[in-house]
Amino acid sequence: MSDTVLQQLDDDGVLLLTLNRPNKKNAFNNEQWLAFRDALVAASDNPKVACVVITGAGKDFSSGVDLNDFSEADGEHPFEISAKALVDFDKPVVSAARGVAVGGGATLLLHTDVVYVGSSLRLRFPFTALGLVPEWGSSYQLQAIIGARKAAELMYTSEWVNAEKAVDLGIATATFDDEEVLERAMEKAREIAHWPIPSLVETKKLMRSVHRAAIHSAMGGEAEGMSRLAGTPENIEAVVAIMEKRPADFKQFRK
């Protein structure tokens, strides 16, 4: 079992999954994507698990993809495998996020059912700033959650969103002090886990069924868009600018 995703199941049927690469702001490498998928599959099959809570170790939720470890894979990429596992997960999921939630760290939250955030939250969908397109079905899911106009503004500008705005927009359910956000998430998960698991599963299936096909369709389109834009001059400039800690210069490509 990989230590990049810690698992702790309590007597109430709440499984706590902790993204555990704090020195990398819990950025996902291939090992962690697969460990996350494996944890969700096991939780779905485990009759003792009624609800899952997802959080991040240290001060941050997740900074998304680890750009230093996003190697190619034979067949379906671990990122895609992990994304599908969460989209299709059939039990309630509560998230507790504080600090940075960027890229995959932000889009992951869109697929959790209850989102509690700490006051330090700094959330961002940075895809246009990276010369890329949205991921993890977020091109559909963000619109479904907060509406097309607000979603377009966030996606086109790649702006930062704090905890208060995340709640106002509807991305987050509620905000708490950083020190209590996980405790509150666990309390809510235990409240959910009190009820019969078959009822919870069937209710989630009904609530998600109207969205699931659209999310999978969006993920297919996003994969095609990523393949067209990854490695383009604009994308390379964006990544190099991050590494060099400077603003990216996209105007050079408009001559």
Image (cartoon, rainbow, N blue to C red):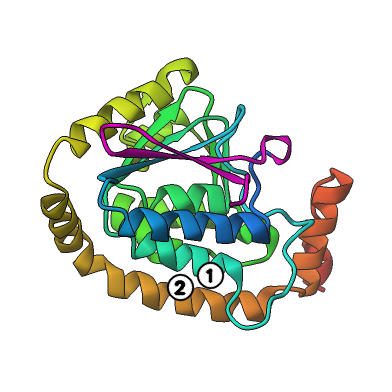
Q: Are marks 2 and 1 in contact (CB under 8 Å)?
A: yes
Mark 2 falls on what kind of element?
Answer: helix
Q: Residue at x 60, y 53 (%)?
A: 126
The residue lying toward the viewer, choosing from 252 and 181, is: 181
Mark identifier at residue 205: none
Residue at label 2? Answer: 219
Q: How many marks?
A: 2
Label 2 vs label 1, nearer the camera: 1
Up/down of 80 relative to 94, above or below: below
Whole-percent x, y for residue 20 in the image: 61, 40
Residue 5 lies in what quarter of the image? Answer: top right
Of all residues shown, which one is farthest toward the right?
A: 244
Is residue 148 visible to the viewer in this orientation of the structure? no
Q: Tell me, yes or no, whether the highlighted magenta stretch contains residue 253.
A: no
Up/down of 246 relative to 41, above or below: above
Whole-percent x, y for residue 191 in the image: 19, 31
Mark 1 falls on what kind of element?
Answer: helix
228 left or right of 216 in image: right
Q: CA distance from mark 2 to mark 1?
A: 9 Å
Whole-percent x, y for residue 132 in the image: 64, 67
Q: Earlier in the sequence, mark 2 or mark 1?
A: 1
Pick the quarter of the image with the C terminus: bottom right
- The region drawn magenta spans 1-24
Q: Amino acid at mark 1?
A: Glu
Whole-percent x, y for residue 232 in the image: 76, 75
Q: Amino acid at mark 2?
A: Met
Q: Residue at x 65, y 81 (%)?
A: 228
Mark identifier at residue 80: 1
